Image: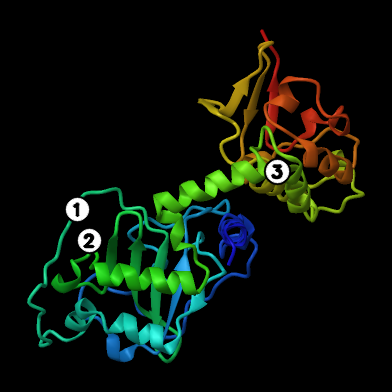
Amino acid sequence: MAQGDAMEARLRELETLHDARGTYGNGNAPQAPATGFRHIAPSGRFPASAIARATMVTFGHSGGGKTPCAPEAEPLRADGTFCSDVRTGHTDLTDEERRSVLALPELVMAADPKAPRPASFSVAVTRCYFDPHHGIVFFDAKGAPVARIVICLSCSEWIVAPASERTGGARPTVMPKEARALFVRIAEAHGLAPWMFDDEQQRALRTYVQDTYGTEDEPTALGRERRRKRLASGSGVPRDHALRDLGHDDRAKLCTWVNDEVRPEGSLRQRNKEGYGYECPDGTAWLGKPLEAECAARPLSCAATVATLEACLVEFREPQSLCGPPPKSCEGLLDCIPGLTRKSPR
């Protein structure tokens, strides 16, 4: 695969991971706990003989407007359903992959206390920042989760549950190199972006993006076209509706779209007690309140249609569009961009 093709494939992976509308907790049918589910104990014998299926998931890339689980609890809630920040793009492991995971010596020892201990066996605990984004959930023949592994590729730590002394106990522990390498191979095979946690590969992707597409503030012609295509599907709100006539649910859709798609995270660069925002040279302050509940509660006053606003936001740039003359398509609309409020100079 040519370098450009490989980089484009990685960008597609990132777009999937960062799309909050793809989480279980946002826009999907409610989950029902599996029949016969029992809480997975933090410690005990690993139930290898009961495992019929395993799936690898990614999580925490976007909260989808919901409160995610604590890192140590991922990727399952206490009732056995997936946490709100788990991606729907997860995939079941092949039989060979599942057998390879269960054959890891640490899991074999955790499942069978009489299993021989390798001569080089050791358990290392570090105090790095545990920030996991991958996990494996193991299910029994009835579809109930019976075990889990929480995986932090950036710090090379894991949590196994049920855990034993052989897997490091119920706290983040340095995972064996062989286990990490296996998890990376599985994640790579299923398009779950393990490369995101390799600094060199991240730098290579950033360089490619900047050279090809420019930045959000200064896009190349290809960058402008890429943005147009990304936003072409719109917010999902009927385009012929007037902004001032939108109800709460439609405003919430607009808020989610603006926050997740139109305005990349971090473009509102300053933080104060009122929210994220910045000041323009003339002293005008713009404040962003991207949380869906706060944003959707604010009615929009413009008589313009949703289609007019969406056409504006294809060209929208911060802070240039807010602090200077806006694009022609945005004239008269800056006070109707969901999640943004203007404060005039005193």
Name the foreground residue: 141 vs 90. 90
Name the foreground residue: 195 vs 54. 195
Amino acid type indicated by mark 2: Val
Q: Position of residue 44 (x, y in %)?
A: 20, 77
Amino acid type indicated by mark 1: Thr
Q: Would residue 188 be visible to someone looking at this image?
A: yes
Which residue is situated farthest in the front direction here?
2
Seen at 70% across and 14% down, the residue is 344
Q: Secondary structure at mark 2?
A: strand
Residue to which mark 1 is pinned: 126
Q: Pointer 1: residues within 10 angstroms few (<14), some, or many (20+)?
A: few
Nearer-N-terminus badge (2/1):
1
Q: Position of residue 280 (x, y in %)?
A: 66, 17
Q: State the CA–CA distance, disc 3 to disc 2.
A: 39 Å
Residue 197 location, quadrant:
bottom left
Residue to which mark 2 is pinned: 174
Vertical side of 142 occupied by 72: above or below:
above
Q: Which mark is residue 238?
A: none
Seen at 32% across and 59% down, the residue is 72
Q: State the CA–CA distance, disc 3 to disc 1.
A: 39 Å
Q: Which mark is residue 262?
A: 3
